């Protein structure tokens, strides 16, 4: 018998507020990131996962892009950060991404994971995962 994936409810900011979850899974791009000399020489692969808890009025969106958090805009911002120049720490990149996401007032919580998959031979990846909340959320 196969095991079914568990479905967890989305976090609510309070008992009466509806939310929706916007996510970006396994975005892979190259970036100059790391503190070691060899990491400064050439870009390396990073994998980014983003989960956003977004305030949701519960009303229909009108099927209009401006009514929702646009994940394509988030991806474009992440690509811009990766292309701006060398970053020492994955933590720095994660914080920048979380800040970008929280700049949209509808985003209540930003969860960001930044992984470097080709660093340790003994591990699939290394990295950091952070969660940042809008004050009051």
Image (cartoon, rainbow, N blue to C red):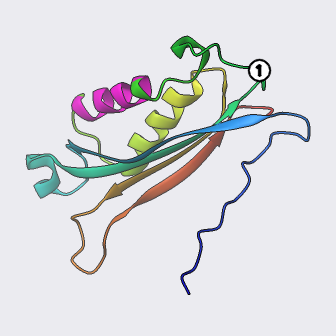
SS assignment for the magenta stretch, majority: helix
In the image, residue 21 lies at what x, y percent? 62, 40
> Which residue sits at x=79%, y=43%?
12
Q: What stretch is highlighted in magenta?
A: 73-83
Tally of marks? 1
Q: How crowded is mark 1: few (under 14 residues within 10 Å), some or many (20 or more)?
A: few
Q: In which quarter of the image is the N terminus?
A: bottom right
Q: Which of the pair 2/66 is nearer the observer?
A: 2
What residue is pinned by disc 1? Answer: 59
As drawn, the residue found furthest toward the right would be 15
Could you say which is closer to the camera, residue 58 or residue 109? 58
**Extreme-front residue of the structure:** 1
Q: Is residue 49 above or below residue 115?
A: above
Left or right of 98? Residue 19 is right
Helix, strand or loop for disc 1: loop
Is 76 inside the magenta-drawn segment? Answer: yes
Place residue 80 in its image quadrant.
top left
Q: Who's the residue at 58% across and 16% down the image?
A: 63
Residue 95 lies, with reference to residue 57, above or below; the image says below
Horizontal relation, residue 53 to residue 97: left or right: right
């Amino acid at each position: 018998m196969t095991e079914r994936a568990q479905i967890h409810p989305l976090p609510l900011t309070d008992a009466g507020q509806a939310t929706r979850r916007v996510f970006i899974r396994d975005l892979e791009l190259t970036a100059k990131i790391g503190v070691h000399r060899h990491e400064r020489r050439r870009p390396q692969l990073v994998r980014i996962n983003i989960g956003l808890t977004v305030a949701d009025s519960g009303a229909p969106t009108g099927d209009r892009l401006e009514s929702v958090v646009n994940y394509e805009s988030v991806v474009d911002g992440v690509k811009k950060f990766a292309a701006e120049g060398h970053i020492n720490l994955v933590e720095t990149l994660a914080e920048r991404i979380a800040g970008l996401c929280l700049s949209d007032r509808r985003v209540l919580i930003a969860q960001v994971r930044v992984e470097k998959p080709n660093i340790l031979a003994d591990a699939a990846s290394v990295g950091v995962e952070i969660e940042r909340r809008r004050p009051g959320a």
